[in-house]
Amino acid sequence: MRRFPGPAILILLFAVGSSSAPAAPHKGHTVVLGAVRKVAYSETGDPAGAAPGEDSLKIRALLIDGALKEWTTGDAHDVTDRSFVVRRALRLNDALPSDQPAKDPKGAWVWQRGPWLLVDRVTGHIAALKLPDYDPGVSQVAWFRDYGAYCGLTPSGKSLYAVVAQIAARKPVLAKRLAAFDAASHSDPACASPEWQREPLRVTFHPAGKDAMAYDIVPGSAVLVEDSDDEAETHSPSK
């Protein structure tokens, strides 16, 4: 008579087989910036300010797994091998409550340059960056590593500052007053894009009507934390 294995042996064999079975491959995300297209644009519709003679804005679609998530404008900057920053393009309803419904539904919408976005290619997560004293009409961000250098404007709107922000850091790495600021009579642009130098790590600001000002930056560790996309799958439920 053939003897069948007991329950304990069956459980052991099942456990061994389960541990040796290959784990299911983790599904990644496809993050793509689409082709450049032009949209109607005017300085009146954008508080960030249009360049002289600029009548169109170049935008690109941010697609994640083939789905449109955001519209973007300008060049993207790779922060790490999996994260990048890019500026958002906003399409706002410009119709007043007293306006009559337009025959052309496109006539009530205007395009604007928006905030900077941090995009994770692995998780597909998109986050809006909160840059200290960032003003869309004044600040032109120059990126290097996970640092963003730009001329910032204080909440009172009366002082122009040299700012270096580090992604995910609470306080700016650098915040130095450059000059007084008058919204009614300031130069356009009020500050040119800063310039970076690697060794030694230095950034130079160019406020309008002032001499260039350079500041040495003490290099620090990156504070950007990139989460794993399968964290929810491996997390055990709390008791």
Image (cartoon, rainbow, N blue to C red):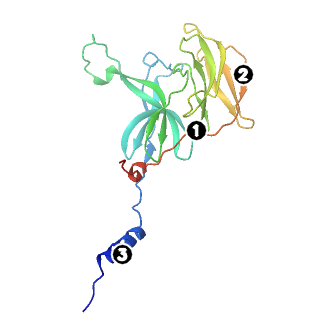
Secondary structure of the residue carrying numbered label 1? loop
Q: Quadrant of residue 23?
A: bottom left
List the residue tagged with mark 2.
Answer: 213
Q: Quadrant of residue 103?
A: top left
In three-dimensional space, the C-alpha distance between marks 3 and 1, rounded to whole angstroms, equals 46 Å
Secondary structure of the residue carrying numbered label 2? strand
Secondary structure of the residue carrying numbered label 3? helix
CB contact under 8 Å: marks 3 and 1: no
Q: Nearer the viewer, mark 3 or mark 2?
A: 3
Q: Position of residue 184 (x, y in %)?
A: 55, 7
Vertical position of residue 216 compared to residue 133: above or below: below
Q: Position of residue 220 (x, y in %)?
A: 66, 37
Q: Left or right? Give the position of 61 relative to 182.
A: left
Q: Left or right? Give the position of 64 relative to 78.
A: left
Which residue is at 68% across, 36% downward? 219
Please report whichever mark, 2 or 1, sits nearer to the chain's N-terminal start: 2
Q: Amino acid at mark 3?
A: Leu
Which residue is at 60% across, 16% downward? 190
CB contact under 8 Å: marks 2 and 1: no
Q: Position of residue 34 (x, y in %)?
A: 43, 41
From the viewer's side, name the closer residue of 26 and 102: 26
Locate the N terminus and report the quarter of the image it occupies: bottom left
Which residue is at 57% across, 44% downward? 80
Q: Residue furthest right?
A: 200
Q: Amino acid at mark 2?
A: Met
Classify 10 Å Cα crowding around label 1: few (below 14), some (14-19), many (20 and above): few
Q: Position of residue 18 (x, y in %)?
A: 37, 69
List the residue tagged with mark 1.
Answer: 223
List the residue tagged with mark 3.
Answer: 13
